[in-house]
Image: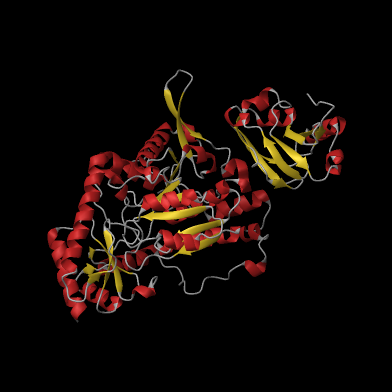
Amino acid sequence: MSIPANLKYSDSHEWARRESDGTVTVGITHHAQDLLGDLVFVETPALGRKLNKGEECGVVESVKAASDIYAPISGEVVAVNGDLESAPEKINESAYDAWMFRLKPSNAAELEALLDAAAYQKLIEAEAH
Amino acid sequence: MPFIPHTEEDIRAMCAAIGVADVEQLFDEIPQTLKSDGLAGIPAGMSEMQVTRLMHERARLDRTLLNFIGAGAYEHHIPAAVWQVATRGEFYSAYTPYQAEASQGTLQLLYEYQSMLASLTGLDVTNASLYDGATALAEAVLMAVRLHKSARRVLIPAGVNPAYRRVVASIVSNQRIELIEVPYSAADGRVTIEALESAGQLDFAALVVAQPNFFGVLETVNALTDWAHSRGALTIACVNPTALALLKSPGEWGGHGADIAVGEGQPLGVPLANGGPYFGFMACKQALVRQMPGRIVGATVDVDGKRGYTLTLQAREQHIRRSKATSNICTNQGLAVTAATIYLAMLGAQGLKNVAAQSHANTLALLQRVTRIRGVRQAFSAPVFHEAVIRLPRPVAKVLADMRSRGILGGHDVSRDYPELGAALLVCATETKTESDLDAYAAALATAAKA
């Protein structure tokens, strides 16, 4: 199972990556897309929306389930990946390239507090039992 | 329907098998304080023989009255074949089957229904029906708020059916949604842009547009739709399906069309029966389909490339998404929908147009007759479909009682919901009324209005 070491993870299966401009890119993990199956629809948060850590901010829908996306950290939505609207399968193909939205963090410490790859690996193993 | 009772012995055996003393013990989790100790006013049981006799006695009191009441439920001729077919064993169920794809005939019928309603409303997609017109409107309000994302306020004109407004308020008020009432113009009974400007000062998610409205009056739907869109809000059309055979479809209103259309399906082949069961319909633009509640049947092909039908877009329904489903009250009225589909198929587009045109003509002919009576006049100047408000020189209750004693149900008393209108009566003449029925109505009203 692919869990890149350079990313941070939430326990609700989002990944987060700090960019050089200080923004944080968010997507769902390879494990999450694997559980959902073939994605048919992605709903991203509105540009400019201010999110609190843990807030529901989008939906990924597969043929068998629809799941909420939660903000892994607090911040303002500064970009959304419009490609997913017409090609949600990109998340299945490459979960770490098919980002969903970018946040301008309002509290940098929240990113550090997220899980690292090893801790996320443990979470997945724990949830499997 | 088969009657399969459990015997005392069956019940004892079942309780013993799961280790409880009696059936009552199964309800132990409900606190004693919440349990009702019988219902006041409900008499003790009667034997089947006694009940049969009582019902025969009651049935003898029924009279066949000439009906001119509309107000949301309409008497139309229903070809005998409609219910003959609808009550065949293969169709006779209120529900979409749980193993839906095993019942291809039912799914095909629902697919045809959806296609017909999409065509009538001029919108891209419809669901397989909702509970009734009022709850369909409530679902549309919830859907609009989900779609709009920021505003939780919806403008709902006073000319929308008062029962619908009460149902909508009951359903949405606990979800932090604010309903803003928009007054109607005293002159023509319509919503005006001025009234909207004043009601819509704060951001709102949607405007409800009834066509025709509760007074039977035709609203200026193009202007209202464009106004809502210019404010970044959705337009919810609340429409009579029969009227759609003649009027511009919601999908064609204004520059971009209404976004969601809902209404009561009863006029399409469902008889008047103590308020139900009826069914609600709902249609929307393709882009909004993922927020539309209820079941949707789609067409597909099987492994051999043959056409088949399947439930689609289920991921947001309650059996998968639980408390986050688009709706948890989107019960399906399958049997009423079956009748409606057969009704529409039998009448065809031209047949439905004829029904609508004859109903309109009969109502105009009735208005012509009654407004010749001294003291009776039409309340609003705007054009009507098959219903209109008339003002009377005597209290409505007295006039209606007089007419009833002459075998005529004279209309719906609107003074209860609209006291500002004074003695005002909502009257409807569908295609079922003949010239002599209209004459009889006018004669009875002339006498009752004078008395």
Q: Which of B172 and B318 is in front in this view?
A: B172
* Direction from residue A3 to residue B403 in the image, left or right: left
| Residue B3 visible at all | no
Rendered view: B326 above or below A127: below
Q: Residue furthest bottom?
A: B451
- Where is residue A82? Give x, y as percent: 62, 32
Location of residue A31 by image quarter: top right
* Direction from residue B378 to residue B103 in the image, left or right: right
Q: How many marks?
A: 0
Residue placed at 83% from the left, 30% from the top? A121
Rendered view: B344 above or below B414: above
Q: Nearer the viewer, residue B65 or B218?
A: B218
- Where is residue B314? Give x, y as percent: 55, 37
- Where is residue B214? Give x, y as percent: 36, 61
| Residue A117 visible at all | yes
Location of residue B434 by image quarter: bottom left
Q: Quadrant of the C terminus of chain B?
A: bottom left
* Direction from residue B302 to residue A96 in the image, left or right: right
